[in-house]
Amino acid sequence: MLSQSRKTGGNGGDGSEKLSINKKKVHQAEKMIRGALVELYKGLGYLKTYRSLNMLAFVKILKKFDKVTAKEVQTIYLKVVESSYFNSSDKAIRLMDDVEELFVRHFASGDKRKAMKYLKPNQKEESHATTFFIGLFTGAFVALFIGYCIMAHIAGMYTQQSNKVYMSTSYPVLSMFSLFFLHLFLYGCNIFMWRKTRINYAFIFEFAPTKELKYRDVFLICTTSMTIVVGVMFAHLILIVKGYSSSTVQAIPGCLLLVFLLVLVCPFKILYRSSRYHFLIAIRNIILTPFYKVVMVDFFMADQLCSQVPLLRTLEYLACYYITSSYKTQDYGYCTRVKHFRDLAYAVSFLPYYWRAMQVYKIEHHLPHHNVCSSDFL
């Protein structure tokens, strides 16, 4: 392509324009080939690991067999296993060497260290500062939450004479965030156990090795976010108790929700942008399930959404309450009286199961009983 563009370069403006277009195509092609080589190298590495793990498994199984049966057949069987093709073949290793050599020559200008940064990216080191801030924000959250509970008890929020407007509009904001970040905290616990038991969850979910969230990152997100939420709700409750009931004060929980939504879609490279981006991609794939290939992370996320129906219904109610400006008149029953919003609440409750059913249908539509499997979710 470059040779063709050079030939047309002497024809004036059109030649230079074609040259720039061809350069773009070459750059895109190089990027695609580089990515393909990285993925190939990664896959060959998994094959190499698979071979060594299989060999280790055979050794342990045969050792256990000898112990249970009181026979010494491990040496005999191991000779057969060691001579088998999966263990004796060195094709994967030789192919890894070839890929490495190609990458060094064409994409790293002969610099092997530079090439290995792409082929074997180093894991992000866990910082002690992250652990420190987890402890700091956990303590702040506990202190603020205790203060909030004491203030709510003093104000009589948990009695029959409680402020119905507050309990119907502001309290659900706290419960919604609590449910979401509790779910995220449990996901962090899952990551901790997966790493402890050496489950390669990053490979299963197809996460980038250098951009995946570690369990400490998840815990930091949970503690920081809940500290902010409880702090804002505590300040809001104090204003309510002191008699401030203007529309500005009533809008504080809605503003808090809006800020978190804006952070979620923030395009700047801050606050775990890569993870936020992949989360939004997963949500998009779930909503448009028939049009996108169902991968493991989308399948897993759709399962989690089926457990978050109360959160989705609360989110729908709060969106209705603040979008219709009902907070200005403190008419907390408007969204439950209007038929359209009641129907929308039922639709929101139904959607996670519908998306899950569509995923099952997408995966198993070629099987004879696929309708039975997908109907289980409906």
Image (tube, helix red, strand yellow):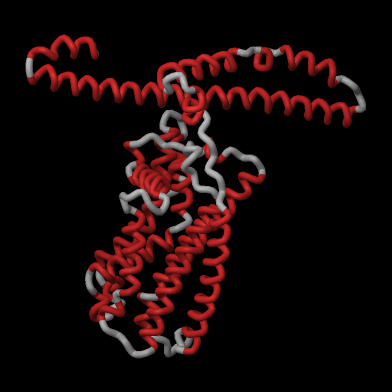
In this picture, is 223 found above or below 350? Answer: below
Q: Nearer the viewer, residue 32 or 80?
A: 32
Foreground pick, 80 / 354: 80
Q: Position of residue 113 (x, y in %)?
A: 51, 27
Q: Along the line of sight, which residue is nearer the eye, 127 or 318?
A: 127
Looking at this view, name the residue that lies furthest to the right: 70
Q: Quadrant of residue 232?
A: bottom left
Q: Nearer the viewer, residue 7 or 245?
A: 7
User: From the viewer's perspective, is residue 245 above or below residue 62?
Assistant: below
Left or right placement of residue 4 versus residue 236 in this view? left
Q: Position of residue 373 (x, y in %)?
A: 47, 40
The correct choice, above or below, for 173 with respect to 189 in the image is below
Q: Quadrant of the N terminus?
A: top left
| Residue 85 seen in render | yes
Seen as rendered, the residue at the extreme left is 12
The residue lying at 41 percent from left, 32 percent from top is: 365
Q: Percent from the top left, x then y, of residue 150?
A: 52, 84
Q: Count the marks.
A: 0
Residue at the image position 24 percent from the left and 67 percent from the top: 323
Q: Is residue 353 visible?
A: no
Residue in the image at 31% along x and 49% along y: 267
Q: Which residue is depicted at the point 91% across and 23% down?
A: 71
